[in-house]
Image (cartoon, rainbow, N blue to C red):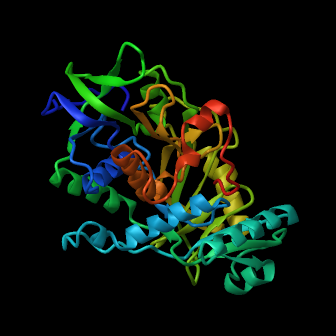
């Protein structure tokens, strides 16, 4: 959105109980769960700098859903997401306008090319099974039996789960959070927060200044700024290890389509691919993965020819003849400490709350983390999942929340 002058909308009130900076998936999730919480009766303002959402991570998501994590908390978070998505209408009060939202459950398939990684997968499968997930460890022969199109040279095994794991229509979930939230009184405006006003002690955010000039009183400030989270945090004198990093997605058609769904396959090279309707989707990080400018969405077409296509065609020889039909570049809000969420209040600025740093798995975590953040703001504690391991204080202590299953 660099160089474009976007229209701004003025807020309807002079102060709000909760001001949320960023109106994409997390701004919409937190605001909806606040509006749905029977103990919350306050006012909510959501400020989105680009209400077209053209450049936000939500728009560029691949809408994936998985329970294959190495930490129980991450598994539980995704299990709630699956339940929420499948029962969206019920969660929205039985509103018959809300569509049924299925999960395309062909699963993730993590491929291991070493015994060390196979042991990591088996350990993860045990944790996931203890949580009730359907993950199973497969030998190379098991994979070959179920998916004979793979070239499994060098592969010793893999993990696969076909229950509540695959992808879903994340755009519809996003749309209904905003629509339902507005109907419940959440105010969304197209504007930009350019400054935060703190009290004399520097312990509370008292106001936000908008690009259009208004100064709005603020009871609680929520940073839902996606890859721009650091810019919002710095307005309160706070540093967080979140930066924008490019991720590339390609949609292609095959001259010889496979005779069954392709699971979301994570190749040991870091390339992933899956069925996408009548087409296939593939993506990967770049080999050199620096932080980029917030407005840098320039494509790198060499990444397809030099990395993705050779790996795809090697892993699935039937994909030797394929044609790209679409592609895009999105940004991860990349947490350089541990690639996991940063949640909860700041240790000094007590009413500054984080929902940041999701590093690629934010969409599938947005139901549980939006609900939890709403609980914490409203009740001062979590009433469902205990999300305190993700709190900001671990950033200050430089104590990563380790998670082996990062893509």
Write the residue at 27% across / 53% down.
Answer: 39
**Quadrant showing the C terminus:** bottom right
Considering depth in this image, is 3 or 300 the residue closer to the camera? Answer: 3
Write the residue at 19% across / 50% down.
Answer: 182
Give percent across and percent down for residue 188: 22, 41
Write the residue at 63% across / 33% down.
Answer: 290
Residue 404, quarter of picture: bottom right
With 339 as the anchor, is 362 left or right in this view?
Answer: left
Q: Residue furthest bottom?
A: 145
Q: Residue furthest right?
A: 115
Give percent across and percent down for residue 262: 58, 74
Considering depth in this image, is 214 or 390 the residue closer to the camera? Answer: 390
| Vertical order, 382 against 46 (above or below) | below
Residue 12, quarter of picture: top left
With 231 as the anchor, is 390 left or right in this view?
Answer: right
* Residue 65 visible: no
Q: Residue furthest top?
A: 200
Give percent across and percent down for residue 330: 49, 45
Please give the count of numbered marks on the rendered protein: 0
Considering depth in this image, is 96 or 311 the residue closer to the camera? Answer: 96
With 216 as the anchor, is 163 left or right in this view?
Answer: right
């Amino acid at each position: 959105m660099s160089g474009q002058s976007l229209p701004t909308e003025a807020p309807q009130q002079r102060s709000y109980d909760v001001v949320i900076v960023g109106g994409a998936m997390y701004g919409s999730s937190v605001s909806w769960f606040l509006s749905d919480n029977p103990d919350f009766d306050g006012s909510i303002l959501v400020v989105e700098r680009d209400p077209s959402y053209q450049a936000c991570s939500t728009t560029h998501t691949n809408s994936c859903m998985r329970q294959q994590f190495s930490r129980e908390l991450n598994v539980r978070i995704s299990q709630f997401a699956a339940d929420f998505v499948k029962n969206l209408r019920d969660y929205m009060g039985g509103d018959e306008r809300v569509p049924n939202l299925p999960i395309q459950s062909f699963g993730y398939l993590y491929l291991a090319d070493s015994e060390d990684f196979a042991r990591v997968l088996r350990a993860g499968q045990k944790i996931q099974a203890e949580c009730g997930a359907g993950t199973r460890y497969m030998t190379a022969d098991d994979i070959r039996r179920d998916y004979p199109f793979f070239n499994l040279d060098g592969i010793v095994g893999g993990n696969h789960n076909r229950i509540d794991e695959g992808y879903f229509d994340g755009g519809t979930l996003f749309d209904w959070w905003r629509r339902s939230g507005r109907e419940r009184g959440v105010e969304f405006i197209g504007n930009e927060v350019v400054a935060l006003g703190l009290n004399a002690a520097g312990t509370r955010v008292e106001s936000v200044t908008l690009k259009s000039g208004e100064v709005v009183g603020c009871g609680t400030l929520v940073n839902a700024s996606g890859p721009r989270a650091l810019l919002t945090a710095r307005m309160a004198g706070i540093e967080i290890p979140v930066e924008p990093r490019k991720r590339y997605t390609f949609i292609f058609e095959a001259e010889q389509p496979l005779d069954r769904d392709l699971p979301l396959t994570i190749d040991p090279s870091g390339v992933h691919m899956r069925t996408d309707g009548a087409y296939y989707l593939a993506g990967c990080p770049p080999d050199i993965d620096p932080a980029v400018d917030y407005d840098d969405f320039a494509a790198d077409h060499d990444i397809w020819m030099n990395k993705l296509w050779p790996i795809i065609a090697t892993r699935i020889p039937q994909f030797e003849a394929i044609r790209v039909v679409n592609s895009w570049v999105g940004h991860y809000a990349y947490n350089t400490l541990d690639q996991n969420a940063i949640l909860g209040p700041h240790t000094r600025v007590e009413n500054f709350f984080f929902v940041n740093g999701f590093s690629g798995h934010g969409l599938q975590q947005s139901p549980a983390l939006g609900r939890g953040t709403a609980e914490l703001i409203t009740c001062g504690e979590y009433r469902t999942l205990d999300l305190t391991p993700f709190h900001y204080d671990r950033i200050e202590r430089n104590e990563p929340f380790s998670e082996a299953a990062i893509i």
